[in-house]
């Protein structure tokens, strides 16, 4: 049985994660902060920092004296300095919407191997998201427990609450945890059903010191149609739409999703990766190496900065040929007042 390639979008309305041509109303969500609740209190502001040399290699072993922090172009003393020797807490966020049906097995395998690179004092948690955000394994250093959590990830949700999942971890789970934190997000970048808007998500990241590493992967519509519906699509050259030679709507959707994930990572001082299932291991290795080299600076903003606006941050390092990647801004709320 053969089915027209573009017709898949029409019959796959319920495959919400990949059908951007069909509008799906937001689903109700519990426990997710609203825009009014996304605030930064007059507490420690965390600034993750990655330092590389002229060859792009990580520079370990620097002490606090090598770092200078500027807030709104004014030199600012910092109260916290952590190095790669300090523990890190990582959240693995796995997209389990219908669109991951053909790649989730490879994601689980790579995620388990990623755990092998954790040190004994590091911790991780496993979270899946589709129609709901689920904590499959809370923060733990027990690799067996974490592997069992990864194995619980099953594709099947009809929505993709990616934004809700990121905010749940960055704001609700990691905000009160001191020290180095990171999110590793594996997804095709589509979002359907999140209560949190894109603007609110970026505001939440601006109020968070958690690094976000996004891993974007393409979904082959032919393989997905065969897996979900047991049908084959007509052969359509990748990157074309009919006989016009233009980019297909599918390709354009994926490019928009990839740009969004890249923007999310850059805002947090993390990194964006694009790869196939076969490249997951190499990507995880790069993320692990970078996390091992991360420094963390923390400071308490002056009360005059608690004005609800964005403030710039700039970190400089006294090391020849060094390149610095760090959090570039933060948002400080006037007061931490619950929404009415």
Image (tube, rainbow, N blue to C red):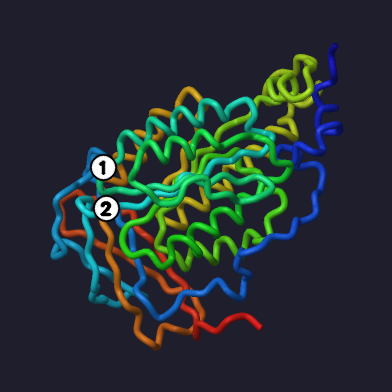
Image quadrant of residue 255?
top right
Dot 2 falls on a residue whose secondary structure is: loop
Q: Is 111 left, or right, of 8 in this rendering?
A: left
Q: Is 58 left, or right, of 108 in this rendering?
A: left
Q: Is residue 109 visible?
A: yes
Q: Is residue 323 visible?
A: no
Q: Residue at x 45, y 53 (%)?
A: 266
Q: Residue at x 40, y 70 (%)?
A: 312
Q: Are marks 2 and 1 in contact (CB under 8 Å)?
A: yes
Whichever of callouts 2 and 1 sits on the residue coming sooner in the sequence is 2
Foreground of the two, 77 or 125: 125
Q: Position of residue 15 (x, y in %)?
A: 75, 36
Foreground of the two, 221 or 114: 114
Dot 1 falls on a residue whose secondary structure is: loop
Q: Residues within 10 Å of mark 1 (few under 14, many from 20)?
A: few
Which residue lies under the disc numbered 2? 87
Q: Which mark is residue 129?
A: none
Q: Position of residue 244 (x, y in %)?
A: 79, 25
Which residue lies under the disc numbered 1? 119
Q: Residue at x 35, y 84 (%)?
A: 302
Image quadrant of residue 17?
top right
Q: Position of residue 51 (x, y in %)?
A: 25, 50
């Amino acid at each position: 049985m053969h089915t027209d390639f573009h017709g898949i979008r029409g019959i796959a309305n319920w495959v919400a994660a990949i059908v951007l041509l069909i509008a799906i109303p937001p689903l109700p969500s519990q426990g997710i902060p609203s825009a009014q609740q996304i605030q930064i209190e007059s507490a420690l502001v965390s600034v993750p920092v990655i330092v590389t040399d002229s060859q792009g290699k990580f520079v370990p072993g620097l002490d606090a004296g090598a770092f200078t922090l500027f807030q709104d172009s004014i030199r600012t003393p910092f109260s916290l300095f952590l190095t790669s020797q300090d523990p890190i807490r990582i959240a693995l966020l796995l997209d389990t919407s219908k669109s991951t049906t053909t790649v989730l097995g490879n994601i689980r395998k790579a995620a388990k191997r990623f755990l092998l690179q954790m040190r004994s004092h590091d911790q991780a948690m496993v979270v899946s998201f589709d129609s709901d955000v689920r904590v499959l394994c809370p923060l733990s250093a027990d690799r067996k427990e974490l592997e069992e959590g990864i194995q619980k990830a099953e594709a099947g949700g009809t929505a993709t609450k990616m934004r809700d999942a990121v905010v749940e971890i960055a704001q609700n789970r990691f905000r009160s945890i001191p020290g180095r934190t990171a999110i590793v997000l594996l997804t095709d970048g589509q979002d359907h059903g999140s209560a949190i808007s894109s603007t609110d998500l970026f505001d939440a990241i601006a109020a968070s010191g958690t690094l976000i590493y996004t891993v974007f992967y393409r979904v082959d519509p032919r393989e997905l149609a065969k897996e979900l519906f047991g049908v084959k699509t007509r052969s359509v050259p990748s990157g074309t739409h009919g006989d016009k030679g233009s980019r297909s709507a599918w390709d354009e959707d994926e490019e928009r999703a990839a740009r969004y994930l890249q923007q999310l990572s850059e805002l947090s001082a993390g990194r964006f990766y694009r790869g196939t299932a076969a490249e997951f291991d190499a990507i995880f290795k790069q993320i692990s190496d970078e996390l091992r080299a991360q420094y963390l600076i923390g400071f308490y903003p002056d009360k005059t900065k608690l004005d609800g606006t964005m403030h710039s941050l700039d970190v400089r390092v006294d090391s020849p040929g060094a390149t610095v990647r760090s959090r570039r801004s933060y948002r400080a709320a006037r007061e931490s007042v619950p929404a009415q």
